[in-house]
Image (cartoon, rainbow, N blue to C red):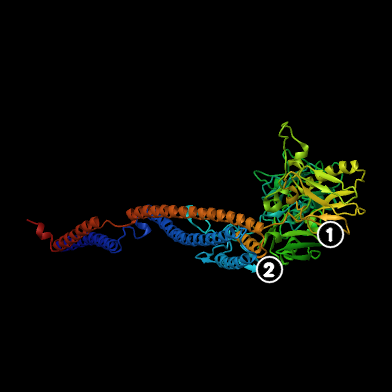
Amino acid sequence: MTSGVIDRVTNQMNSRVSLATLGRTNLALFALQQQISTGRSILRSSDDVVKAATIGVLDDRLLRSGQITRNLQHADSALSVADTTLEEAVNVAQQAKSIASGQVGATVTAAERAGQSRVVDSLLLGLFNIANQEGVAGYILGASQSASRAPVEALRGGYRYRGRGDGLLTDLGSATAVPLTLGERNPIASVSQRTGGQVDLDPVLTDDTRLADLGGARGMGVATGVIRMSINNAAAVDVDLSGIDTAGEARVRIERAVRAHEQQTGVTVLGPGGVTFSGGRFSFDVQGAATTIVFSDPGSGVTARDLGLARIPAVPVAVAQNQGLDLSPRLTMRTPLSAMAGLAGPLGRIVISNVGQAVEVDLSGATTLQDLRNLIEGADLGVRVEISADGRGVEIRNELAGRSSQSLSIGEAAGGNTATLLGIRTMSPATRLASFNFGKGVTIVDGAADPITGLVDPDRNVDFEIRLGDAAGTVVPVDLRPQDVVSVQTLLDRINAEIQPRLAAAGLPADALVAGLTPHGNGLTLVQGSSFAGPIQVGVRNNSQAAHDLGLTGGTYDTTTSTLTGEDRAKVRVECLFTHLLDLRHALTVNDVSGIQFASGDIESAITRLAEARGVVGGYGQLIESATEREADRALMDETVRSQLRDIDFTEAASRFTLLQTQLEAGLRTTAMASQRSLLDFLG
């Protein structure tokens, strides 16, 4: 090999090695320049897979943290407006309380009180504007529908609150439970407590009943899946109930599987009834005393048990009277009225009274619970129809704040019993006496003793007396005991039990006086013999409040029916500041001193509730503040960790950049020197 060839080979090898070295150095310099210009040491996932993955997680957390922080700031602003709204309402209530306190003196004239009623009118207008105040999250009193419409509207001389729910929620991280608006139980404008639900309507299963509306045989709902079925101890077959939505779909699939078995074996299992529903259960028209259908759940499934078909230990359907277990169907607005207990035929009429106005509502055209709801709420008297929490009954709520004496009452139209069948009559035999007088109940005298003997004196425990209109003026004393003031029915039973011995002692027939419930409207009744010339009179004994609390002292006597009908003490009032201001305005207008005092007490209670509500809002504000601080601390920690993983150390980068520059310069010099040498340089 000649020296020239050797020189060329050597130069080529040197060039390749030098170029490779220079390329690596240049690439390192380029990468370092990018890192310095961006300030980041990790520019792509391939730079460091583990660090890149961790940085990605931190990026997501910081992005969510930023949104939560903005939400917390938004919530803080909303709560600030809510607190201001409550403060303004407190000012209105305190002004009303001051007016009431100044108008109870004996020297105040009726004209002065009438003039102050106009001041209360202006307070009502101001409160109306306060109630419809908006914040950053919508209407402050808008509950869970804060942006849809103004929560309070003037209606029929009262104020209707349309909010629903406990308040608007948003993602606030650790403070998620903080509502941004005031819920439907706020002290400014609200709805009444639930009433009704006195009848278990016990809806039956239908093909349209959704599985989601079933309590299930285990009380845990119904989970869909595969069930296993064995007929007459034959090999079990699986029936797929996955993805079904209604009880009718389950019924059809089960019956189809049984019919398929009949075709395969030629043995009749089901009669013409097939698989149907009986009340809240599946029912099977099993043919033959020896025919059995046994259901079970394969593996860890629970569908057969949830549908009431399988039991542990397994029980054949035939042994179980051809029926499964009750699935506890719940009412929904789609439930047909025909599927409810006691509502086989068309409904009749009910009478709804509110804010001094009464409307007779015809429910005969209703076929579903939604129809019923539309008809009742369509009367536009501020009645809200809801389903009870257990899904078994219908309940009502009063949305319309008006004078207490004109609060909501639902009764029967003449000759009807529809409200009672539905369980929404506000005074029925099942009505609790604790709900009378807007929750104050009925106060009785009990356990009063003779001051001398120290023994219980029956005469000192008489609550009221009933004086008949007969010639002898027969008097019936009534002593109510704690066990008698549970419900309207227990009360009537006790009064009638007290009446009978007195009638017998006076030589009067057993029906000479009967306590009952008015068949239309609402109120207790005392009906005496039609031959008695005088009216029935009710007198108070032992300073007991019972007769007044039951509405008997303010009752009206009808000479044509010989009936004393008491006042309706089971009306449903909206407990809010609007109601109390309306009561105060009316009492001032009619110069009713006792009414002013009662309204003043209610306003004082409203002030207490407003203060409590402000305390709750303040507590929410502290939660927001704490959550904001925690979120900031967590974001700072995440930022620090991400910076340590992602950001470049400029001091170390500058040193490395200088080193690479020196390395590149040395490489270039070495390459240049090597390219100038030949074999002759090494020969001596």
Could you say where residue 657 lies in the image, as x and y percent from the top left? 22, 59
Image-based side of 622 in relation to 393, left or right? left
Mark 1, secondary structure of its residue = loop
Q: Pointer 2 and pointer 1: residues touching (CB < 8 Å)?
A: no
Compared with 210, 466 (above or below) is above
Q: CA distance from mark 2 to mark 1?
A: 27 Å
Q: Is residue 224 visible?
A: no
Q: Position of residue 322 (x, y in %)?
A: 82, 45
Image side of residue 122 versus residue 410, left or right: left
Residue 321 occupies which quadrant of the picture? top right
Task: Mark 2 vs mark 1: give the one in front.
Answer: 2
Q: Using the image, tell me which numbered label, if any, was put on residue 271.
A: none
Seen in the picture, residue 167 relative to 293 is either above or below; the reply is below
Write down the quadrant of residue 110 in the picture: bottom right
The residue depicted at 21 percent of the width and 60 percent of the height is: 18
Q: Residues within 10 Å of mark 2 (few under 14, many from 20)?
A: some
Image point (81%, 45%), residue name:
495
Q: Nearer the viewer, residue 372 or 239?
A: 372
Residue depicted at x 9% and y 57%: 683
Q: Which residue is mark 2?
A: 156
Query: Residue 630 appears at what percent x and percent y?
Result: 42, 52
Q: Quadrant of the N terminus?
A: bottom left
Amino acid type for the residue under numbered disc 1:
Gly
Mark 2 or mark 1, earlier in chain? 2
Numbered label tally: 2
Residue labelled with disc 1: 416
Q: Can residue 457 be seen here? A: yes
Q: Amino acid at mark 2?
A: Arg
Which of the two residues, 214 or 202, is positioned nearer the viewer here? Answer: 202
Q: Residues within 10 Å of mark 1 (few under 14, many from 20)?
A: some
Reply above or below: 493 against 23. Answer: above
